[in-house]
Image: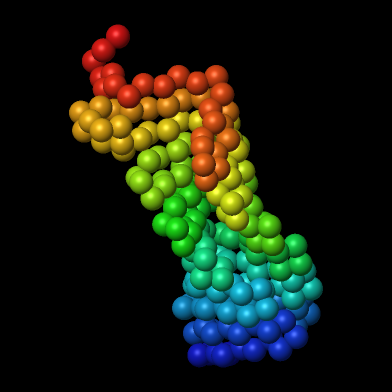
Amino acid sequence: YAYNSNTFIKSENIIITSNKVKYDKIKDIITFIDNAKLDDRKKELIVIGDHIIYEKNKNLIYSKGKAKFNYRNKYFISSENVFFDRNKNEIYSEDETLIEDFDNNTYNLKEDFIFYLRDEIIKAKKSIILDRNDNKYVFDDIIINLKNNEIVGKELKVEFRDSYFGNDENDPILRGRSAHSDEEKLSVYKAVFSTCNIENKK
């Protein structure tokens, strides 16, 4: 045990500070407790939480409870009970996760997400995306390519900003069985679309 610790894992170029640290020498597991900050300089990732575990044999970092991740100052992740596999370069969790990028797009991943850091690709079972124009996209089984802003998913529902088509009184909405989006266009298949306010209307 140590207190007010500043730990340097030289072989992996990782620096961790915390109020308390426990090193299990038999299992080769280090646990950082209370106000912990892990700076993985080799992988360009910072993790901040109150309970961070590093399993050296598996090269696996686990943040128990709430935590924040900063990857290359490009992607900011807030979640709970998150794993970071340093061998595979993957971040994943079963809990609801919020990812924000440097373009002010917000990805609310509701279930089972995995972030492939090397390819900058995200997969999730359910998600809500809020773009820079405040339009909301609800997807099932989504794949997001962050490098080119390409998105593929099922059961799309798009809730546009009310004034998006020039009339504040409207309530524009788009639904489809599947969709593909990139920087230039959004393609929706088996879709229904309306710009009208359909409240109290047949």
- Vertical arrangement, residue 81 with respect to residue 170, above or below: below
User: Which one is in front, 135 or 21?
Assistant: 135
Percent position of residue 156, x then y: 50, 31
Q: Quadrant of the C terminus?
A: top left
In the image, residue 44 sits, relative to residue 75, either above or below, namely: below
| Residue 148 image offset from top left, x and y in percent | 59, 51
- Place of residue 100 in the rendered image (x, y in percent of width and height, measured from the top left): 46, 58
Residue farthest to the left, as pictured: 169
Figure quadrant of residue 157 = top left
Q: Quadrant of residue 55 in the image?
A: bottom right
Residue found at x 76% / y 67%: 87
> Which residue is drawn at the image coordinates 40% and 40% (left, top)?
136
87 relative to 13 in the view: left or right: right
The residue lying furthest to the front in this view is 184
In the image, is 1 to the left or to the right of 106?
A: right
**Which is more toward the observer, 14 or 82?**
14
Is there any visible trace of residue 51 in the rendered image? no
x 56%, y 90%: residue: 6
Image height check: is 166 above or below 99?
Answer: above
Q: Is residue 200 visible?
A: yes
Report the residue at 49% width, 56% height from top. Answer: 99
